[in-house]
């Protein structure tokens, strides 16, 4: 898979027919996945390639930075996920003054001039484009087909009568509704990070942890989660309980939140060590973070959390 930083760079390199999936694709949720699948299906029919055209930062970062939404994933994570869902290539085009001034009626020409082999667009039904977001999916379809370019508009995905969107996922994430988040993502919510050396407070009270300095833009609610931790170098996956937050019982004036992961099974700690990358998949939210009156009270609660985590994962 190729990742390109400009549409011109991509267009000069590839001459095959291209189906372009257009969107921000933050989170790459189940609605996005349908758009990607439509792009891939058309590309196969025309012996072409499927390409995601997206942005490294949200357009609002340029247009109205004070209201830019926090992102569910960074550009690197998004590129990997788009590839995992079958896209041949990804174009990250920075949203800038030039793009913000392209009139909606000129958008198809703008793309055609830069990717002469464009043969199709795939978009969601709520897709907007052009100056002041005046263009919609129906206009793209009308203008594209006038130029012989196929445009497929994909219906939104709905869960419980509500449209799946990146905004809705952010809202559910911030209140700890991780099962709803996973349902909308179509997969587990994953955290990636490098294990760092901590103060070994967990080990001192009988619950050793792996510590991650992890500060995403769109963060889950502070609290205790259950899931699976995977050593990316060893392909080892283990059941775990994790606390994300400020650790108020044990520390004061902590500068930033931390993810502390306690593995539920016995494992070879020497294989894990420090300074390696892990993936933590969150499956359940047990409780919000809380400041306890004593270390003993904290230990009792951790034991309860541990037992609940084991019970939850038994039937997973």
Image: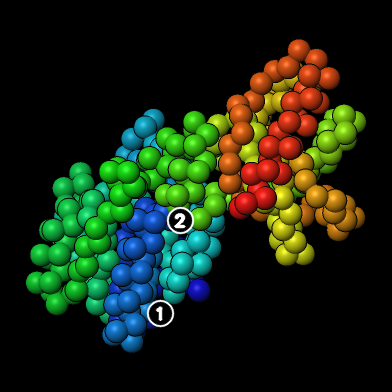
Q: Circle 1: is it few (<14), some (14-19), or many (20+) Cα within 10 Å?
A: few
- Lower position in the chain sequence, tag 1 or tag 2: 1
Residue nearest the observer in this picture, 250 or 20: 250
Numbered circle sitting on residue 124:
none
| Corner quadrant of residue 16 | bottom left
Residue 261 x %, y %: 73, 42
Numbered circle sitting on residue 13:
1
Residue found 77% across the figure and 46% down from its top: 263
Mark 1–mark 2 CB contact (< 8 Å): no
Residue found 25% across the figure and 61% down from its top: 154
Residue found 75% across the figure and 19% down from its top: 249
| Corner quadrant of residue 288 | top right
Q: Residue furthest bottom?
A: 47
Q: Left or right: where does residue 229 sit relative to residue 84?
A: right
Residue nearest the observer in this picture, 114 or 87: 87
Residue 266 x %, y %: 85, 51
How far apart marks 1 and 2 lie (CA) works out to: 33 Å
Q: Left or right: where does residue 199 sit relative to residue 255?
A: right
Question: Visible in this render: residue 159?
Answer: yes
Residue 210 x %, y %: 78, 43
Q: Which residue is mark 2?
A: 186
Work out whether 82 lies above or below 227.
below
């Amino acid at each position: 898979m190729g990742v390109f930083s400009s549409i011109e760079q991509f267009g000069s390199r590839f001459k095959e027919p291209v189906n372009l999936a257009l969107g921000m694709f933050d989170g790459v949720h189940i609605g996005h996945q349908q758009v990607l699948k439509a792009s891939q299906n058309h590309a196969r029919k025309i012996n072409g390639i499927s390409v995601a055209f997206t942005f490294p930062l949200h357009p609002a970062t340029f247009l109205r930075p004070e209201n830019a939404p926090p992102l569910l994933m960074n550009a690197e994570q998004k590129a990997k996920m788009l590839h995992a869902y079958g896209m041949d290539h990804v174009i990250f085009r920075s949203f800038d003054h030039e793009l913000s001034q392209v009139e909606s009626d000129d958008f198809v020409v703008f793309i055609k001039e830069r990717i002469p082999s464009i043969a199709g667009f795939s978009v969601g039904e709520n897709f907007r484009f052009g100056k002041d977001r005046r263009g919609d999916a129906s206009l793209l379809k009308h203008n594209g087909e006038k130029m012989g370019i196929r445009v497929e508009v994909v219906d939104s995905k709905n869960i419980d009568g509500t449209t799946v969107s990146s905004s809705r996922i952010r809202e559910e994430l911030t209140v700890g509704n991780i099962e709803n988040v996973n349902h909308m993502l179509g997969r587990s919510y994953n955290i990636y990070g490098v294990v760092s050396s901590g103060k070994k407070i967990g080990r001192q009270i009988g619950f050793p942890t792996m510590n991650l300095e992890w500060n995403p833009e769109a963060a889950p609610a502070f609290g205790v989660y259950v899931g699976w931790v995977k050593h990316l170098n060893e392909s080892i996956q283990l059941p775990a309980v994790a606390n994300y937050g400020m650790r108020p019982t044990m520390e004061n004036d902590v500068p930033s939140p931390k993810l502390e992961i306690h593995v539920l099974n016995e494992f070879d700690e020497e294989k894990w060590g420090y300074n390696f990358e892990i993936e933590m998949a969150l499956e359940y939210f047990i409780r919000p973070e809380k400041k306890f009156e004593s270390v003993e009270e904290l230990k009792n609660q951790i034991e309860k959390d541990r037992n609940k985590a084991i019970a939850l994962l038994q039937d997973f």
